[in-house]
Image (cartoon, rainbow, N blue to C red):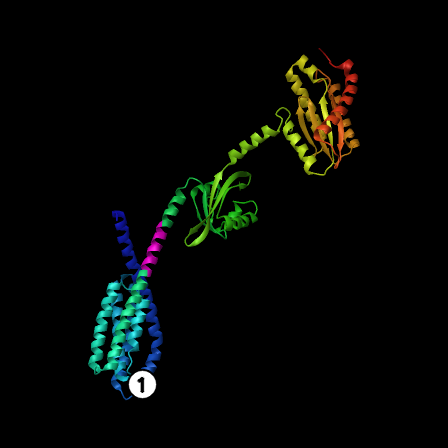
Amino acid sequence: MTLLEFVKKDSDDVEYLHHNAKVSFERLRYVSFMLVLTYPGFFIFDFFILSKLNHPTYRWVLSAVHLTGLAASLIFLFLYSRYKNALKESFINGYILLYLWLGAIASINSQTFTGNIYAYLIILFGIAVIFPIQPKHLFSHFLITHLLFVAGIILVHPLDLPLLVKLVNSTGCAVISFTIALSFNRYRLSDFSNRQKLKRNEESFRRLFHMNPTPLILTKLDGEILLINNQAIKYYHLEGKDISSLHPNRFLFSQPEEMAGIIKRLEYEQSIKNYITEQQIIPGENKWSMLHFELVDYLEDTCILIDTMDITAMKEKEQELLEHATIDMLTGVKNRRSGLELLHKQLEWTSQQFILCYIDIDNLKIVNDRYGHTAGDDLIKTCCNTIDRHIGQNDILFRLGGDEFIVIFFEKQNSDVEHIWQKINQDFQALNDTHQKLYPISVSHGLYHYKPGTSITLEEILELADQEMYQNKKHNNTRNDNALIYQS
């Protein structure tokens, strides 16, 4: 055993003795109350029922025993109420001896009149069960009292076989009572040691809990917050708030039913890792958090330990990467990959009709060659912005590549789409009339109306719409042959 373990064991032994003394005082108080409350019955029995008994010695000895018990109880209750913290363990031992002697005297007295020794046996069992006395003290109490009891019985009654049997039985009762007290003491010592270990573990848990660099919250299954460290208070902006009145639903989850779902999962899985949620920390400030949930035992109750990790920066970076992967950087609309993926899903998983519009910007190569790629990029953005202004919220525009774009029109007929193109062409013509650009702006388009159940692939749809677009481009090129460039 190390020095530290020895010190802890010695400290635990001292605390155990103090704990037992405290329990003994409390139980002696209850016993004293009971003796005071029951004494009126004893008084009636001693001074009225036994008043005509032709055995005055038995009567007066029994009355003296009952009065002594009453007086002792009243004295203890008075001292306990006035000097509770000043009473020593020896005070308890004195009362235990007094009760044993009163029981022994009552049984010796009864033996002379009724031939029974029940009072002594009852006191033996009662003290063994009720009072957590140190075994070495209890052994000396039992031994001294029992020797006096045996001597008293022999003095007041001739020793014969029935009396000898009673003495043997009473000795066995004393041995059994001490064995019971010894067993209870070992159980109490084990229970006390376990509680001390639990207390030390709880203190270690609390210390580590508050030292943890990440936000931690410990709650009961009903949501009552038991512990919350400073990191969690800062993270969730709970400074100055009454933590005991808060519920995790108010700041951990956007929907109350989320917590119920978490608890239901924990009942089967015991722990939940990497639970990602968006939390409104304060009005106007949202954070993305990764939560870990663990069922733990704390203070003999099943609780939930919640670990929070701030992943807002990671989610923002993820969103940025997603935009790079799905958005065309020049125009800000969907790129080829995300647009074609959406079209594949539309064909495979939905039964919704749509009109695919294949768009090609006219004369982009000539603009690039004569005015540079900056002017060409400006032409692409101007056309894209103009088209985007006229399509519906549910319609989708994406860049197929270079000067080619696709618009997917939902819940429209060909006539509706052509009407939209009339407005788009009017905007282009109005821009051309102002001569703000060095070149005329126009686009060519072709349509394909897809209806559910049609046996056709995406590639075939694009090809058919592309062919329609080229027919429109021939018309536009003929119209613009003589006015392609406003100035060289």
Picture quarter containing residue 184?
A: bottom left
Left or right of residue 268: residue 445:
right
Q: Position of residue 158 (x, y in %)?
A: 21, 83
The answer to whether residue 366 is above or below residue 293 is above
Asked if residue 93 lies left or right of residue 332, the reply is left
Give the extent of the magenta segment.
187-200
Q: Is residue 223 above or below residue 115?
A: above
Which quadrant would residue 39 be assigned to in this image?
Answer: bottom left
Residue that appears at 78% across and 32% down: 416
Of residues 193 and 288, the one nearer the viewer is 193
Residue depicted at x 27% and y 47%: 4
Residue named by callout 1: 50
* Residue appearing at x 21%, y 73% in the figure: 147
Q: Quadrant of the C terminus?
A: top right
Q: Is residue 208 magenta?
A: no
Point out residue 252 in the picture as x, y percentages from the top left corner.
52, 45
Residue 332 placement (x, y as % from top left)? 63, 27
